[in-house]
Amino acid sequence: MSVDRSRLHIALQRSGRLSELSRDLLRDAGLRIETSKNALTARAANFPADLMFVRDDDIPTFVSDGVCEFGIVGQNVLHEFAAGTSEPGFEVLAELGFGQCSLRIAVPEREGYDGPRSLAGQRIATSYPRLLREWLDRKGVAADVVEMSGAVELAPRLEIAQSICDLVSTGATLEANGLRAVDTVLDSQAVLIRSRRPLDEARAAIADQLLGRIEGVIATKGSKYIMLNASSDALKGIVALLPGAEAPTVLPLHGRPGHFAVHAVCQESVFWDTLQKLKAAGASAILVVPIEKMMM
């Protein structure tokens, strides 16, 4: 497969929920993605970027080696790849706020657990041997790490190991296999990574455009634009109540001396109780609207 070096290349997980959410992020950033079912690559029709769909544990390698300039991958995969590496060939640009899960220690439901020391001398099955070994070393626990590529939750039942270390989202899979989560090794979410390899001037400019768009999408998630009216006496208290607003715009209201219009981008969700507090503080004509696009 030839690689067009006049375009950017973004590595995404081939399938699954994280893949879908990653594509949604790029679409929200304005990329019109042309793809067909089961395709390994896709092209953005309106932006000089190509997507490569690969195994999640291959994404750090693609980005480190410069095959892809960017990648979207779970922190669990990234940390496992980087464990024991002094200088990984990528940098983390942003946490993306989706794909949340936790790498957790789980034991049979009937087994007691009194902290990490309970694992001493045990065999622990996992698909993340480096992360688990680092965690055990930090806790001062001597245990055997059994590497498995899948079906880790079956290890205690098959007497391969006494406990496991595996990804947990809802906990339903653990419960179905008679296990319970007892300790957290790593909390994870999707992140955007970039290769440390230098780009030529033209592609560096394209990369900056892409990053600007993605940062704008991230900034709008959960953010709201709020508008209200307030008197000069109530202004200070009302501004203090605006969630996550750093520098609201305050404008005098025409024909109403001593009254102002307040406009602000709120970086946190605006709930009904916040609106009630604003009204109680003297705000009126409160309007909250979603933000479709924002360039940082």
Image (cartoon, grey):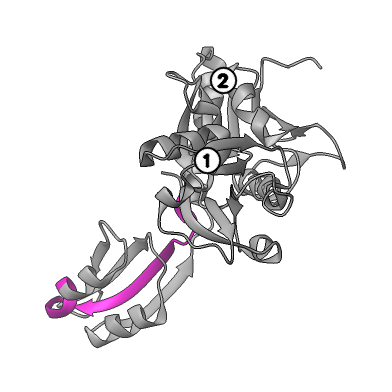
Locate residue 180, reporting x and y percent: 57, 62
- Left/right of residue 213 with respect to residue 48 in the rendered view: left
Q: Is residue 165 above or below residue 13?
A: below
| Residue with the mark numbered 2 | 64
Q: Which residue is mark 1?
A: 75
In percent of width and height, residue 153 lies at 68, 52
| Image quadrant where residue 168 sits | bottom right
Under mark 2, the amino acid is Ser
Q: Secondary structure at mark 2?
A: helix
Mark 1 secondary-structure assignment: helix
Q: Nearer the viewer, residue 261 or 161?
A: 161
Identity of the amino acid at label 1?
Answer: Gln
In-front residue for pair 280/117: 117
Location of residue 9 in the rendering, given as x and y in whole percent from the top left corner: 66, 26
Q: Is residue 15 visible?
A: yes
Residue 111 horizontal/vertical position (percent): 55, 62
The N terminus: image quadrant? top right
